[in-house]
Image (cartoon, helix red, strand yellow):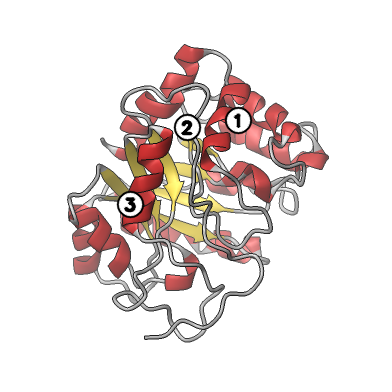
Amino acid sequence: MATPPLPIGNPPPDPTPRQPATPLPPKACDCHAHIFGPFDRYPLPANPTYRPALAPLSEYVRMHRAIGCSRGVLVQPSPYATDNSALLAALRSGQYPLRGIALIDDATTEQQLEELHMAGVQGIRRALGKNPEAAVAALPALADRIKRLGWHLQLLLDAASSPDLDRALLALPVPIVIDHFGMVPADDGVDSPGFQMLLRLARSPRCWFKLSGAYRISTRSPKFPDVTPFARALVAAAPDRCVWGTDWPHPNTAFMPNDGDLVDMLTDWVPDEAVRRKILVTNPEQLYGF
């Protein structure tokens, strides 16, 4: 099946990821990435949320070899909606140590949940969108469905626009994982209401954070120094509940980073080698069951 031309903002990932200046430790895990295609086997639906570039599992593994990463967590991307076929194929391939985060809806059956679990899925992702209060109201029923599997709920939210969601989120009966610094603009700073909500969430032993997607909240490429205070504040508040991810292949963004640079940014965010190893190795083992 032919794939339509890509709009600006969805180029392929950098094909030459460079070796990081500071090597990653053994068993380091990239906890946030997506795969797309091959499109002849896993075509996009007629009206996807965006049209990504081709980014198959083989290229993801090649990128990991280049940066020295050892394990990965694949997150079901929104263009595929709840068709988790490409994700399942990757998890079942045995090519690489992987875990998965799926998308589900009310039509997802209990048998499908079991199949996802057996393949290595450890949670589901939900974007709260432009009406977060309504989206949060639907989360308890969703959490009840996944609780028996030991899964967590990964959330993409706009904390700056909804800085009072923490009480509702902490009432959920499953662990919560927050993507991409809660999408708080770096210009807002750590004292902003949105980021202060993240720090309140960090007090709970059931809330985790992904240090990922700096280019989604800052325009100061390529090192995004204004994101460093965010990362350091979250690590100081929850060193046992922070993980790191490349967000490869960096879809739906105006900036295409080199993944080796992203590794070196983590060194700036977390200068302490022991804490960095915790974020890269120990914490992912706990959260994803490696």
Secondary element under disc 3, as helix, strand or loop, is: strand
Secondary element under disc 1, as helix, strand or loop, is: helix
Question: Mark 1 Cα within 10 Å, few/some/many (few <14, many 20+)?
Answer: many
User: Residue 83, percent across and down?
Assistant: 35, 73
Of callouts 1 and 2, the N-terminal one: 2
Dot in front, 3 or 1: 1
> In the rendered view, would you say 85 is above or below 158?
below
Looking at the rendered image, the quarter that the N terminus falls into is bottom left
Q: Nearer the viewer, residue 22 or 183?
A: 22
Query: Which mark identifies residue 144?
Result: none
Amino acid type at circle 3 is Gly
Q: Residue at x 76, y 40 (%)?
A: 186
Amino acid type at circle 2 is Gln
Q: Is residue 191 left or right of residue 131?
A: right
Tell me how far mark 3 sits from mark 1, CA to CA.
25 Å
Q: Residue at x 58, y 49 (%)?
A: 168
Q: Which residue is mark 3?
A: 100
Q: Which residue is mark 1?
A: 265
Query: Which mark identifies residue 19?
Result: 2
